[in-house]
Image (spheres, rainbow, N blue to C red):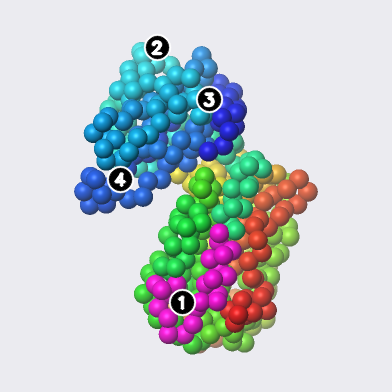
Amino acid sequence: MFEAKIYIERRRKLKELVKTGLIFLPGNSDVPMNYKDNTYRFRQDSSFLYYFGLDEQNLAAIIDADSGKEILFGDDLTMADIIWTGPRISMATKGKLVGVSITKPMKELAKVISRAKKKRQKIHYLPQYRAENKIWFEDVMGIKAIRVNSKASEKLIRAVISQREIKSPVETEQIEAAINVSYDMYVAAMKMVKPGMNEKEVWAILEGMSLKDGSGTSFPMILSIHPETLHNHYHGNVMKDGNILVLDSGVESPMYYASDITRTFPVNGKYSDLQKALYEIVLKANLTAIGMMKPGIPFRDCHFAACKIIVTGMKELGYMRGNIDDALKAGAHALFMPHGLGHMLGLDVHDMENLGENYVGYDDEFKRSKQFGTAYLRMAKRLHEGHVMTVEPGIYFIPELIEQWKADKKYADFIDFEKVSKDVGIGGFRVEDDILVTETGSRVLGKPIPKTVKEVEEACNR
């Protein structure tokens, strides 16, 4: 938890941005795996953490932008609770830790909201992503669960994004703490991986490291010799000589700020000539995009610069042909990179995605494309000092996509499908770093994780 003054200032700024009305911020509760008392690992709502910092179940808060009053809701433990969970600090003490002087039992929340509704006071809340919270809203707000998100406050969404998207130095420190755990995980993985090992042997050790030195993973780990499936969470393959392995994972810091790193390395410790050539195209795309990043530059421009590097490289290898700019404009590159360059990073690995990706990554200047591939670009708008972005270009040979485009003769002027089909089993390559936009440029956060061919091969053969 940060100092109370940080949360006080965040809430002051939020009231200033929203101007009027009641701001309702619910926390999260436990979610059962298979029965009530056997729960998944608890994770607090990120916006609640941002404004109130309390990492505990069954809390909620009201911020009155009209009066300035702030109320924290929750129940002190009963003796029956204490027997099973042990003692915890009181609600009053929790309030003091984050600069809130008024605390009330949870049953009082509905009364406060009811009074506000009677006064016709606007009640602002964010979109809800948990079913139990939507059902709870039926009780406290009188809105059917199925309609809760349609009535979320756009004004509050925009206000929260404007605050959370700019990372303060203390937040950047937390992100770097998470990346430094990732560093240890990636170096360990490169040393550990050998032909004949099962993916789950590596996955289990890395998962343990994320829990030992952080707060666990920030998303389900992608560790696979089949990276042509972009979000491949299966870990049951036996790694063989000649396979390429993609490791895409993140850690949450002790205060739940995320890292998100990807490296692609050879199972036997040495890239083949073709693996090396494809990897170096992706690496060049990564470095080119990072080199462009600074305040005022549209992230969409960084995306297309990376895509142009990929088209150029794939043409040099004979997989693509024709005019590079025409191929890029048509979207032919999406056969090999069908996703966007990156996304914001913070308390969520896809920061604030539950608030609406178009609010986070787009604005009045930049509208989302409908073109295949480009449509998946999560962030297009101009960069600002304090943005933290992932940069993760890739090249993938996706059999089903290749077969469909080949059958349809899609972009046949730009793609040599015969050559592509011959190498369809090579899998995929991705390189990802976490970047802070600074006053004059950008900085790769955290300890430098082996990235060049030489660095990766040396790490794999230690």
Disc with the residue nearer the chain's start (4 vs 3): 4
- CA distance for labels 2 and 4: 35 Å
Tell me, yes or no, whether the highlighted magenta stretch contains residue 186. yes
Disc 1: which residue: 225
Instruction: Give the farthest residue toward the left.
Output: 35
Question: Which secondary structure, mark 3?
Answer: loop
Image position of 46 with respect to 402: above or below: above
Does the CB distance between marks 3 and 2 fall below 8 Å?
A: no
Image position of 154 with respect to 361: above or below: above
Disc with the residue nearer the chain's start (1 vs 2): 2
Disc 3: which residue: 99
Residue 14, by quadrant, is top right
Comparing 432 with 462, the one in front is: 462
Residue 45, by quadrant, is top left
The amino acid type, in three-letter code, at marker 1 is Ile
Q: Please name the residue shown 41% across and 45% down the image.
A: 43
Q: Please name the residue shown 45% across and 72% down the image.
A: 202
Image position of 300 with respect to 79: above or below: below
- CA distance for labels 4 and 3: 28 Å
The amino acid type, in three-letter code, at marker 2 is Lys
The amino acid type, in three-letter code, at marker 3 is Gly
Where in the figure is residue 142, as x and y percent of width and height? Answer: 29, 26
Disc 4: which residue: 31
The magenta stretch spans which residues? Answer: 181-202
Q: Quadrant of the C terminus?
A: bottom right
The answer to whether one can see residue 47 in this image is: no
Sort mark 4 into few (<14), some (14-19) or many (20+) by Cα contacts within 10 Å. some
Residue 435, by quadrant, is bottom right
Where in the figure is residue 50, as x and y percent of width and height? Answer: 52, 37
